[in-house]
Each structure stands twice: as structure tokens, then as C-alpha cells.
């Protein structure tokens, strides 16, 4: 049964604000508004990167960077986004389909995550993790980022502990959501980062030293 215990007055206001933003910015990525604004100033036309989980972010990123590799696990949604890219005449995106092929606790073995193996270490400017196998995607992406590169994790409050007010956020007493997330937490522990919270969900940007 669905729980509505998180529907406090504060959450209602946050949710209303989020819906209003989404309606007034129909082309914005499904990230927190603050993260979207920050990325619009940090991304450069010379950048190349990867995203796991395609959608509105795919076209938005393609307009701001040199090249994007986008990986999608849902074949129907992959077709929908591919059609949008074609209709917009986008030529700087490799939009790949990789179905879930292993259990989620073995994500590093999946073809979805192993897409990263086509890139040299320290060769990417950013990695947006917003799909499946997020822990393995985040972990392997770190080695592929060049110094100063951005690791962007959406819904990060579900996986790494924080004091976020978003529903379902993990508390410091709970620790990371898995062993792999614990390893990611240690790896990004020395990174400068920007943790944004809409009150509905969180998006974190980690800057590789």
C-alpha cells in the first residue's frame, strides 16, 4: 500500500514548486532545478561525456557539449528518445540501448555499465548517473573522468547518507545503500561537491580532484 506519511506541509510546498518548475521548463532535465542551473554554467562546448538514463537531459546536454554517449535500458523509451533526437537533427549523440542482463547487485558485469569500457581513463568531462545499476555506473565513471570532471548523481539521497529533507533520504546513521555505494562514498570523499535538494529529490555534483 502506498504511503503518504511524507506529505507534510513543507513537502506539499516543495512538490508544488517542483511541478510548477517542470511545467514552465518543459525541456529541462529531470534533475533538481538548482543542479540544472549550475550545470548550465559549468558545462563547456568542448566537453564530451556520458549519461545513463536518457530523456529530456539528452537533448538538453546535446545543445551544450561537443559529444554525448547516452545509454538507455528500456527499448520503448529508447525508441521514443531516438525519434526526438532525429526530429531535432541532433548528430552529436550516440544513443545506445543496453537491456538489464544481470541482477542489480552484479551491475559491474552488465553490458549497460560496461559501455564505459569503450572510453579511456581520464578522458571524459562529465558522467550523469540517472538510470539503472547506479552504484556500478558511479563507481566505474570516476576512473573515466579527467581531473575537474563532473560526476552527477540524481536521486542521490536514496543511496548516500545526508541530512536531506527529501522523502526516503538515507540518514548518516544508516550509511550508504550498498557496499558499492560505500566504496563510491569513500572515493568521492575528497571531492569538492555541490549537493542540491528540491525537497522532492536531490542531485549531487562531485568534482574530481
Image (cartoon, rainbow, N blue to C red):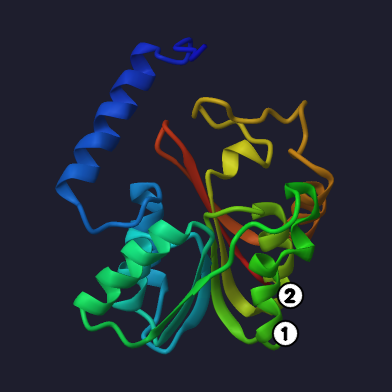
**Quick check: 118 left or right of 195?**
right
Earlier sequence position, callout 1 versus callout 2: 1
Q: Residue at x 57, y 26 (%)?
A: 168
**CA neighbours of label 1 inside 10 A, class few (<14), some (14 to 19), many (20+):** some
Picture layout, residue 82 above or below residue 153:
below
Q: Position of residue 164 (x, y in %)?
A: 55, 32
Q: Position of residue 74 (x, y in %)?
A: 49, 57
Q: Quadrant of residue 91?
A: bottom left
Q: Position of residue 30 (x, y in %)?
A: 37, 51
**Residue 137 seen anywhere in this rendered image of the structure:** yes
Q: Residue at x 58, y 67 (%)?
A: 98
Picture layout, residue 197 above or below residue 152:
above
Report helix, strand or loop for mark 2: helix
**Residue 40 seen anywhere in this rendered image of the structure:** no
Do the CB atoms of the residues marked 1 and 2 lie less than 8 Å apart?
A: yes
**Quarter of the image with the C terminus in it:** bottom right
State the residue position of label 1. 121
Q: Residue at x 68, y 67 (%)?
A: 113
**Quick check: 11 left or right of 126?**
left
Asked whether 175 or 69 is in front, the reply is 69
State the residue position of label 2. 143
Picture layout, residue 209 above or below residue 187:
below
Amino acid at each position: 500500500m502506498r504511503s503518504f506519511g511524507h506529505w507534510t506541509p513543507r513537502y506539499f510546498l516543495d512538490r508544488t514548486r517542483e511541478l510548477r518548475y517542470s511545467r514552465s521548463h518543459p525541456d529541462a532535465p529531470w534533475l533538481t532545478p538548482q543542479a540544472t542551473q549550475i550545470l548550465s554554467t559549468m558545462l563547456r562546448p568542448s566537453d564530451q561525456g556520458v549519461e545513463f538514463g536518457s530523456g529530456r537531459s539528452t537533448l538538453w546536454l546535446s545543445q551544450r557539449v561537443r559529444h554525448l554517449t547516452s545509454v538507455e535500458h528500456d527499448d520503448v523509451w529508447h525508441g521514443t528518445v531516438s525519434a526526438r533526437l532525429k526530429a531535432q537533427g541532433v548528430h552529436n549523440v550516440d544513443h545506445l540501448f543496453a537491456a538489464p542482463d544481470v541482477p542489480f547487485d552484479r551491475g559491474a558485469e552488465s553490458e549497460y555499465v560496461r559501455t564505459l569500457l569503450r572510453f579511456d581513463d581520464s578522458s571524459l568531462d562529465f558522467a550523469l548517473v540517472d538510470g539503472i545499476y547506479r552504484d556500478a555506473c558511479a563507481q566505474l565513471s570516476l576512473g573515466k573522468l579527467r581531473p575537474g570532471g563532473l560526476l552527477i548523481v540524481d536521486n542521490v539521497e536514496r543511496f548516500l547518507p545526508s541530512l536531506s529533507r527529501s522523502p526516503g533520504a538515507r540518514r548518516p546513521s544508516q550509511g550508504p545503500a550498498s557496499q558499492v555505494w560505500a566504496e563510491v562514498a569513500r572515493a568521492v570523499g575528497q571531492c569538492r561537491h555541490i549537493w542540491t535538494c528540491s525537497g522532492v529529490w536531490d542531485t549531487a555534483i562531485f568534482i574530481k580532484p
